[in-house]
Amino acid sequence: MKSLILRGITYLAILLTVGVLLWVVGYILFNGVGYITPDLFAVEHTVYNQSLFPALMGTLMIVGLALIVAVPLGVGSAIYLVEYAKRGSPYVKIVRTMTETLAGIPSIVYGLFGFMFFGVFLGWGLSLLSGSLTVTMMILPLIMRATEEALKSVPDTYREGSFGLGAGRLRTVGRIVLPTAMPGILGGVILAIGRIVGETAAIIFTLGNVARMPNSLFDTGRTLSAHMYALANEGVHTGPAHATAAVLLIVVILINALAAFISKFVKGGS
């Protein structure tokens, strides 16, 4: 009887989760797809077309630059903590505590820090570089923790078998541990991408909110989330705001699908 009740609760939780997801996705697409027009993808933004193309390119630039810095640092740090550092050492505990603390800091605090340090102290102002490094600090703890958990999930027998065949630690990590943990690592990267594309406050403080495509690392611009916020805040362009939300959702879905494909390819190739 108890097992039936628990099974029913589990199925109910699954149905509620899937239902909420489908409702949110359906609501966004239903209200936004109808407003997607060719004018929204014009190269230059004007008061007449409300083009989201510069914001889309700004989003892709921010995501690309942030991942270029955060993924090697986060994955490398996690590899050291799990594979090389002594397990249970005070140093590892301190690093993990600091990582969890950084993950809980509100994004507005990151935005203020990025503005004061990158924008004012280093003199970069509102720029693509300031924004990308700021969101890099935001997603670094997320990638580190996800990579750590993925590496821990790899059975120690894999490592022992590799060592028994004469492979060194570096070869074992690179050829055995990392490919096995790749789905979990990519899961953390996907979550990091989701946080980047959905971030608004920190982006406005560091990148700015100018409706144009950045021409260099020190040029300003905006992302899709900031573009959607600006349109919705004006109150006269609700249609393009809904369309921007739909495009943002489609971009996230495509990125997730690409990450899943890469995960299967890497796992199959290993």
Image (spheres, rainbow, N blue to C red):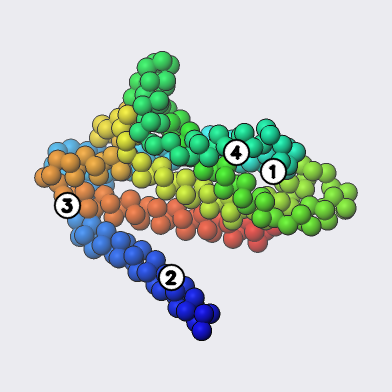
Q: Is residue 64 above or below residue 268?
A: above
Image spot of residue 75 (x, y percent): 61, 41
Element type at mark 2: helix
Position of residue 77 in the picture relative to residue 155 (left or right): left
Q: Residue at x 77, y 42 (%)?
A: 170
Element type at mark 1: helix
User: Label 1, label 3: how many angstroms apart (C-alpha)?
Assistant: 49 Å
Q: Residue at x 34, y 65 (%)?
A: 20
Q: Nearer the viewer, residue 10 or 6?
A: 6
Nearer to us: label 1 or label 3: 1
- Which residue is disc 1 drawn over? 82
- Which residue is disc 3 drawn over? 239
Q: Amino acid at mark 4?
A: Arg
Q: On residue 14, which mark appears?
A: 2
Q: On residue 96, which mark appears?
A: 4
Q: Nearer the viewer, residue 41 or 75?
A: 75
Mark 1: give few (<14), some (14-19) or many (20+) Cα within 10 Å.
some
Q: Amino acid at mark 2?
A: Ile
Image spot of residue 142 (x, y percent): 51, 43
Nearer to us: label 1 or label 4: 4
Image spot of residue 190 (x, y percent): 48, 50
Element type at mark 3: helix
User: Label 4, label 2: how many angstroms apart (C-alpha)?
Assistant: 32 Å
Q: Earlier in the sequence, mark 3 or mark 4?
A: 4
Nearer to us: label 3 or label 4: 4
Q: Amino acid at mark 1?
A: Val
Q: Are marks 3 and 4 in contact (CB under 8 Å)?
A: no
Q: Residue at x 47, y 58 (%)?
A: 257
